[in-house]
Image (cartoon, rainbow, N blue to C red):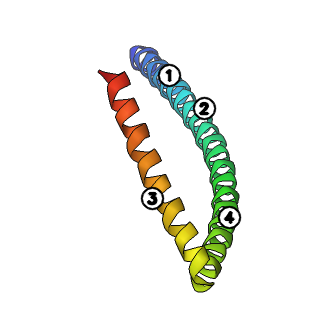
Amino acid sequence: MADWNRGHGSVEDMLDAENKRIAENLANKVSRLKSLAFDIDREVDDQNEYLDGMDSNFLSATGLLTGSVKRFSTMVRSGRDNRRILCYVSVGLVLVFFLLYYLVSRIQR
């Protein structure tokens, strides 16, 4: 009977040691997951701030474009002289665009 108690005690010690090892392993995994969760939370906060900034930038650009379209519409609806100026400006902008395109294509070669 004494041999059985001695063997039984060593089995309990082995199981106890195995449980401690598994518990430490689990604690390490939990701490890694916690760190990962904090990193994800920080990244989400950064992305939300970035998106909020983009939203305000788009709103300001929308306001500028709306004002430009209103001024353009007013100029188109006005008299014949303004239409002639509008035609010259449009042709000038198209020519500037093609000139810039030509220059950029020459630089890239």
Instruction: Choose mark 4 or mark 3, whichever is in front.
Output: 3
Mark 3 or mark 1, which has the lower sequence index? 1
How far apart marks 3 and 2 lie (CA) works out to: 66 Å
Q: Nearer the viewer, residue 45 or 5?
A: 45
The three-letter amino acid code for the residue at tag 4 is: Leu
Of 72 and 11, nearer the camera is 72
Secondary structure under tag 2 reads helix
Q: Residue at x 48, y 27 (%)?
A: 22
Classify the position of the C terminus by image quarter: top left
Q: Earlier in the sequence, mark 4 or mark 3?
A: 4
Identify the residue under disc 1: 21
Horizontally, residue 63 falls left or right of residue 40, namely right
Q: Which residue is mark 2?
A: 31
Mark 3 and mark 1: span between their CA atoms? 79 Å
Q: Which one is nearer the viewer's eye here, 13 or 108?
A: 108
Q: Amino acid at mark 2?
A: Ser
Which of pointers 1 and 2 lies earlier in the amino acid sequence? 1
Amino acid residing under circle 3: Val
Which label belongs to residue 91?
A: 3
Residue 84's place in the image compared with 2, above or below, is below
Locate residue 78 relative to residue 95 in the image: left or right.
Answer: right
Expressed as whole percent of the image width and height from the top left, the position of residue 77 reads 59, 85
Residue drawn at (45%, 16%) of the image? 10
10 Å crowding of disc 1: few (<14), some (14-19), many (20+): few
**Residue sitting at x 57%, y 81%:** 80
Please give the count of numbered marks on the rendered protein. 4
Are there few (<14), some (14-19), or many (20+) residues within 10 Å of tag 4? few
The amino acid at mark 1 is Arg
| Mark positioned earlier in the residue sequence (4 or 2) | 2
